[in-house]
Amino acid sequence: MRVTPRMYVYMMQQNISVAQKQFYTASYQASTTKKLKYAADDPTLASYQMNSNMALDDIDHFLSTNAVQKERLDNAESALSGMTDIFQRLKEIFVSSASGQYNSQNRITFADEVASLKAHFIQTANMQADGSFVFAGFKTESAPFDATGQFVGDANEREAEVSKGLFLSVGTPGSRYLTELDGGINLFKVFDTLESGLRSNDIAKIKSASPLIDQGLSQLTSARIDVSGKIGRLDLAAQTLEENKNLINDSRSQFISVDPIEAIATLKQVSDNYKASVQIAAKTLNISILEYMK
């Protein structure tokens, strides 16, 4: 078939159009390091990009949830640590007051300190984090313990979805940690027992507080172990999420992104090809580049 001048011009135009499109694509990739500008350029790759974006959004959501719950548990552990220190002081008061070197007036002074320690213990048990009471179960808007140490909260344990379909207990139930409702002892009553013995100068009653103080310390230690275990499980879930996030980002870098250095090299190459196509067309058709571009 004979190639007419009109057909030749058309082929030149097509060559330049292809080179121009390649130049625009390479320019976009070099400036953004992204392979696609429009989803229509590659529907399969665009679908992958959309799905990976959704997966990353889910991971960020769960990481945020984990961070909030971990902060709450950290606060609970800090509170339990403070309560343990208070019970350690009770132990010191018992050891001193049970000896014969102190008189009844000294024991009244100790009793006043025990009463102050109980008030501090109740205040710590009613601590808040981000406006919610840490040891209140589901009733996070109300203090779980009244002024006497009576539990008025909720005994349920909260759960949180820390990864897709994975729910972990993140509750810090004051009923289980600090009262007799789950087989332990009421730690608040330990203060009452020791204070009563001190105020009445009753050595036998003072000594009866000793095993209660030891049991209270053991109960607080178990509570701290429980909270630490929950923190550890949250850390593990967060670590897994971060690893999945890295895997997705690595995959995206292979299928969605381009290497910046390669993109610049490609841009230079297609730019040269584009210029060469225009120059060849202009020379072949005996017109100037400026006239051709018009």
Image: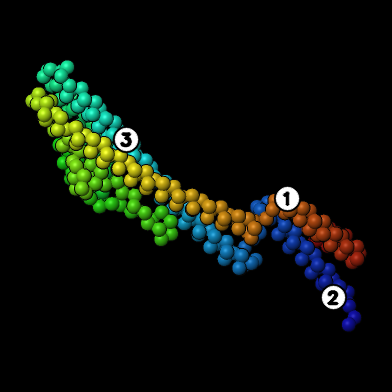
Whichever of labels 3 and 1 marks the residue nearer the N terminus, that label is 3
User: How many numbered callouts?
Assistant: 3
Distance from label 2 to label 3 (Cα)?
87 Å
Q: Which residue is mark 1?
A: 261
Q: Residues within 10 Å of mark 2 (few under 14, many from 20)?
A: few
Q: As rendered, which of 7 and 39 lies closer to the eye?
A: 39
Q: Which mark is residue 52?
A: none
Distance from label 3 to label 1 (Cα)?
54 Å
**Percent coordinates x, y for residue 49 in the rendering:** 57, 61
Residue 9 is at least partly visible in this image: yes
- Residue at image position (30%, 43%) is 222
The answer to whether 147 is drawn above or below residue 152 in the figure is: above
- Residue at image position (83%, 71%) is 11
Outermost residue toward the left in this view: 200
The answer to whether 51 is drawn above or below residue 175 in the figure is: below
Distance from label 2 to label 1 (Cα)?
39 Å
Whichever of labels 2 and 3 marks the residue nearer the N terminus, that label is 2
Of the two numbered discs 2 and 3 in the rendering, the one whose residue sits closer to the viewer: 3
Of helix, strand and loop, which one carries label 2? helix
Of helix, strand and loop, which one carries label 1? helix
Q: Residues within 10 Å of mark 3 (few under 14, many from 20)?
A: some
The answer to whether 14 is drawn above or below residue 274 in the figure is: below
**Residue type for callout 2:** Met
**Percent coordinates x, y for residue 198 in the rendering:** 12, 25
**Percent coordinates x, y for residue 164 in the rendering:** 43, 59
Q: Which mark is residue 7?
A: 2
Q: Which residue is mark 3?
A: 81
Q: Quadrant of the N terminus?
A: bottom right
